[in-house]
Image (cartoon, rainbow, N blue to C red):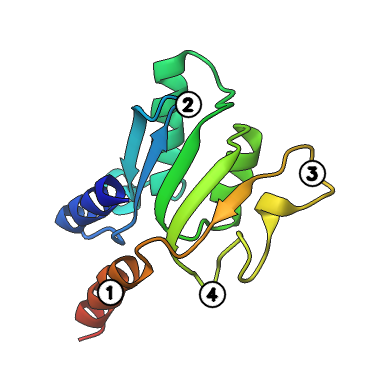
């Protein structure tokens, strides 16, 4: 989660929402990292999770990320949860809950939807206070 938090901090440079993600391989090595880049690249799909998943798939030379773990500072949204399921990532660790748009148990539960062909083990609340504080500070500064 420390590396994901560092990535989130990097998003502040481009005024993107500070969310960071890391994909770890089965051996625990880093395969991909990402931060929100929607503002930086004028791309609504450039969420931290998607950026990290793309990098990990390229590193492995395979779209299937079996055995990998995604670590992200905020509960994935529906789009990112869909990408996680499609990439066959078996484990997701996240920090803060997203009570407005989360899709890993708060608003929706795409990652554990039994009607889909892949289910994900979810580990929420890791360093939750730090992850939430980063987002709170970002939005409080943008509201002023």
- Determine the CA span between mark 4 and mark 2: 32 Å
Which label's residue is closer to the chain start, 1 or 2? 2
Q: Which x, y percent locates residue 81?
A: 59, 49
Vertical placement of 23 versus 71: above or below?
above
- Residue plotted at (30% across, 48% down): 4
Q: Which x, y percent locates residue 132?
A: 34, 72
Q: Where is mark 3, residue-wise?
A: 116
109 lies left or right of 60: right
Q: Nearer the viewer, residue 18 or 46?
A: 18
Label 3 neighbourhood size at 10 Å, few (<14), some (14-19), many (20+)? few
- Determine the CA span between mark 1 and mark 2: 30 Å
The label nearer to you, 3 versus 4, is 3
Q: Where is mark 1, residue-wise?
A: 133
Assign the C terminus to one quadrant of the image: bottom left
64 lies left or right of 35: right
Of all residues shown, which one is farthest toward the left?
Answer: 13
Label 4 neighbourhood size at 10 Å, few (<14), some (14-19), many (20+)? few
The label nearer to you, 1 versus 2, is 2
Which label's residue is closer to the chain start, 3 or 4? 4
- Determine the CA span between mark 3 and mark 4: 23 Å
Q: Which mark is residue 85?
A: none
66 lies left or right of 108: left
Vertical placement of 80 versus 135: above or below?
above
Which label's residue is closer to the chain start, 3 or 1? 3
Q: Nearer the viewer, residue 12 or 3?
A: 3
The reply to whether callout 1 and callout 2 are in contact (CB within 8 Å) is no
Callout 4: helix, strand or loop?
loop
Q: Where is mark 2, residue-wise?
A: 26
The reply to whether callout 3 and callout 4 are in contact (CB within 8 Å) is no
Of all residues shown, which one is farthest toward the front?
Answer: 27
Instruction: Specify whether residue 46 is in view.
Output: no
Residue 130 is drawn in which quadrant? bottom left
């Amino acid at each position: 989660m420390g590396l994901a938090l560092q990535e989130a901090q990097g998003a502040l440079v481009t005024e993107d929402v500070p969310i960071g993600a890391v994909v770890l391989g089965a051996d625990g090595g880093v395969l991909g990292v990402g931060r929100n880049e929607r503002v930086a690249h004028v791309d609504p799909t450039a969420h931290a999770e998607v950026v990290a998943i793309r990098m990990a798939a390229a590193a492995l030379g395979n779209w299937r990320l079996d055995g990998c773990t995604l670590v992200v500072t905020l509960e994935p949204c529906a789009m990112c949860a869909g990408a996680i399921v499609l990439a066959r990532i078996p484990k997701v660790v996240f920090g803060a809950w997203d009570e407005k748009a989360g899709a890993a148990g708060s608003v929706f539960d795409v990652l554990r939807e039994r009607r889909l062909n892949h289910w994900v083990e979810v580990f929420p609340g890791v360093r939750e206070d730090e992850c939430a504080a980063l987002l709170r500070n970002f939005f409080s500064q943008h509201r002023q």
